[in-house]
Amino acid sequence: MAVTPDSPVSEEVSLTEGVGEVLRAATSRAVTEVSLRQFTGGASKQVYAVDARDETGASLCAVLRRDPPGHGDADRMRAEAACLRAAAAAGVPVPAVLAAADTAPGIDAPYLLMNMVEGESIPRKLHRDPEFAPVRERLAGDLGRVLGLIHRTPLDTLDLLDDQDPLEAIEQIYRDLDEPRPTVEMGLRWLREHRPPPRRKALVHGDFRIGNFLITPDGVRAVLDWELAHRGDPVEDLGWLCVRAWRFGASAPVGGLGTREQLLDGYAQTTGFRPTAAELHWWEAFGTLKWLVLSRFQAERHLSGEERSVELAAIGRRVCESEYDLLAVLGLFDESVAVPTPFEPMVTVHDRPELTEILDLVAETLTEEIAPTLTAEQQRQRFLLRICVNLLGTASRELHAGPAATDEVTVLLGELGCDSETELAERLRAESLSYSDKEIRRVVSLAVLSRLQVANPRYLK
């Protein structure tokens, strides 16, 4: 995942020393000063910026990726290093691997040490900053050309990569969550019924999206984060790049940067073949369902008690965004539905400010009075503060909405002979109901829209 700089590492002296030793061995230079700065926003890896100097005073900049100590996956890290080396040999812009191993003193986990590449990955800057205007209109084609290079990478050194069927893999993750959802069941059935013939297997990046590559005004400088790479259908990467979640609020379908036609044009220039619109649509639908399931999977880490986290908790409330996107990309969202008018507030013995007013006031105070006091070095605190403010807004909107939407969904489910959305999902899975039925589309659309109006009403604009 993409990351943003945070505060300096203060107590991990042994890690600093260990990185210094690895850097000395990798560069054959007498490294005399090493400092680390951890990044925030990574998913399963710990990522550090490495700033060092040699005996001449010359600067050495690198990036360390390691598994959390005690939770390492050496095979996966070896595969990531192999992908970077193979992709580099094929002409893909990637950071150069300086060192990689299952462990090292002080690092104490499988790791990768790479050279630092300059460039921007923050979506809003790529979408809006004037300095990227010259490259912005051609980026979709450039990304298609880069994907073509990735997919032409020889597989002879990549035996470590898995080649599991991606639809079966994501369905298994969903089943293991043991939370049947009508939208997922509808999506799975549509995907099985419309699956295109497979392409010849290639190196698939697995998370090729805005945020995971570095851009300068000259173009794409580096493709990052290869931890999900595998062997599979190359069109998977193209579809993933088109998923709405990776547009970050911009309207253009390819990462908020360009058109699908530009993407396919660039891809064809590198590979000599052009996937069909139907193939790209199927893989975009698959990617949307995949992100829905993975979002719910991430939230489960908090909900199960495994990892208490306000960030993961917030993700749980955003699953409805992907539900909405999935219904939309499949053409199954019922545009006629509308969220019921909220009930009037109940009479209460409590004084004002009312509960919703309290939540709104706290959110306003955090945003307007506390957030501006945080320094640039307090990126993590700023990030968490934004999440807390968003959750307060969700709570306020849910209290204001009352039970009207839940009551209407319950009535519509009853007309279908179902007590709950779970029962509807189970009947869709058993194929005793048709996912294209008008009344099913209506109740599922209403449930998703009601959740979205509370969780993130701006998503509908």
Image (cartoon, rainbow, N blue to C red):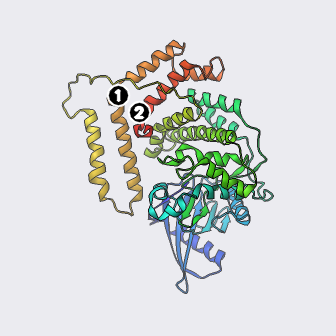
Between residue 108 and residue 161, name the one nearer to us.
161
The reply to whether residue 95 is visible in this rendering is yes
Quarter of the image where the C terminus is located = top left
Place residue 178 in its image quadrant: top right
Place residue 350 in its image quadrant: top left
Between residue 424 and residue 35, name the one nearer to us.
424
Name the residue type under label 2: Gln
Disc 1 crowd, CA 10 A, few/some/many (<14, 14-19, 20+):
many
Give the residue at mark 1: 401
Helix, strand or loop status at disc 2:
helix
The reply to whether residue 423 is visible in this rendering is no
Name the residue rendered at 56%, 38% in the picture.
292
Quarter of the image where the N terminus is located = bottom right
Give the residue at mark 2: 453
Name the residue rendered at 66%, 38% in the picture.
282
Name the residue type under label 1: Ala
Q: Is residue 377 left or right of residue 67?
A: left
The relative height of residue 329 versus residue 257 in the rendered view (above or below) is: above
Alpha-carbon span between mark 1 and mark 2: 9 Å
Disc 2 crowd, CA 10 A, few/some/many (<14, 14-19, 20+):
some
Q: What label sits on residue 93 in the rendered view?
A: none
Name the residue rendered at 41%, 53% in the picture.
383
The relative height of residue 58 versus residue 11 in the rendered view (above or below) is: below
Locate residue 424, reporting x and y percent: 56, 20
Residues at circles 1 and 2 in contact by the CB criterion of under 8 Å: yes
